[in-house]
Amino acid sequence: MMKPQKLTIVGGGSTYTLGMINSLIAEKEAFPLSKITFYDIDEQRQASNAKATEILLREAYPEVEEFVYTTDKETAFSDADFFFIQIRTGGLAMRELDEQIPLFYGCVGQETCGAGGMAYGLRSIGDMITLVNDIRHFAPDAWILNYTNPAAIVAEALQREFPHDNRILNICDMPAAIMVSYAQLLGCEIWDLVPEYFGLNHFGWFTKVRNREGVDLTAELKRIILEEGISAVDPEIADDPSWQATFKNMQTMLKDNPEYLPNTYLQYYLYPEKMVEKEDIANTRARQVINGREKRGHCCK
C-alpha cells in the first residue's frame, strides 16, 4: 500500500475543489493522504472552500493529519509530494470576454477552442511557467498534475519550457467523462473499459474501446450511439442542459464521420457556423457558469 502523501491543491478557491475533496475521500485507500494544503491568490474564495473542507475531512477523512490553506507560496509548496493545479488566469470575467469577442465577429466563442481558447492559453502560459518554477524551487521531486485549460496549449508550453521534467502530467477529464457515458451504454463500469485515443486536448478521437479481456466493443458502441444516441451521465455534467445538447451532437458527428468515436468538443471544429448561430452573446457558457455553478457553490459555503 502507498504511504500517505502530502498534496497541495493550487487554485483552492475553485468551485471544483469540494468535488475534488469528495473524490479524494472516495479514493483514500488507493491514494492515502496525510496532509492537504490549499493555495490560492484569492484569500476569500479559498477560505470559503477551506471551511467546508475542514468539516468534510473531520467527518469522512480523519486520516488526514494536517490541513492548511494559505496564500503564501513557500508554506504551500514546501515538502509536498503531489501538486494539483487548476488555475484560471483572469477568472470568469476574462473567460466571458474570450467567448463574447469572437461571437461578436461571427466566430466560435469557446474557452478552449478558436480565438477565445488562444487568448486564454496565452494568458495561462506565463502563470503556469511561473508556478512550475516556484514549485520546483520548494519541491524539486514532487509530481505536478496540471488541470489548467486550454490543456493542449498549456501542455505544449510546459513541455517546451521544461523538456526534461518527467513529473509534470497535463490532464483533461473530458475523455473520462465521455467514457462514463460509454460504460452506461454498454452496461459496465468505466474501469472495465480500455480505450485507444489520439488527438490534442479536445480535438481527439477514440479509435478503439475494448473491455479488460480484450474484446473489441467499438462496433457495438457505435451502433448504440447511432440508433439510440448518447447522453451526459457523469455527475459533474449530467444536470447541465448545455452539456446534454453537446452530447446529443455526438450522434450527428458519428454519422458524418463514422470511422472514429468523437470527442464532444469536435462540434466546434466540424460545425462552427451551427455553433455560432445557436450562441447568445449575452448568455455564453461563462455567464451560465457564473449564474449557475458559481452561485450554487457560494450558496453551499
Image: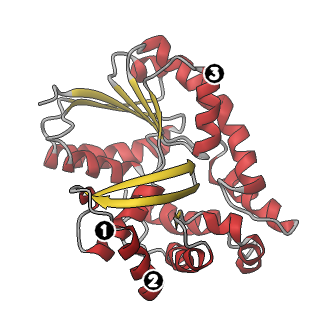
Q: Residue at x 69, y 56 (%)?
A: 113
- Nearer to me, 266 or 39: 266
- What SS does tag 3 mark? helix
- What SS does tag 2 mark? loop
The residue that disc 3 covers is 161
Q: Is residue 246 left or right of residue 114?
A: left
Q: Position of residue 5 (x, y in %)?
A: 24, 27
Q: Residue at x 44, y 88 (%)?
A: 227
The residue that disc 1 covers is 183
Residue 299, visible in the rendered structure: no
Instruction: Classify residue 184 by image quadrant.
Output: bottom left
Q: Residue furthest bottom?
A: 227
Q: Position of residue 256 (x, y in %)?
A: 62, 77
Q: Type of residue at label 3?
A: Glu
Q: Residue at x 54, y 40 (%)?
A: 87
Instruction: Classify residue 37 by image quadrant.
Output: top left
Q: Is residue 53 left or right of residue 239?
A: left
Question: Is 225 drawn above or below residue 101 in the view shown?
Answer: below
Q: Report how far apart the C-alphas of labels 3 and 1 lie in the structure.
A: 37 Å
Q: Is residue 55 left or right of residue 80?
A: left
- Nearer to me, 202 or 120: 202
Disc 2 vs disc 3: Cβ atoms closer than 8 Å? no
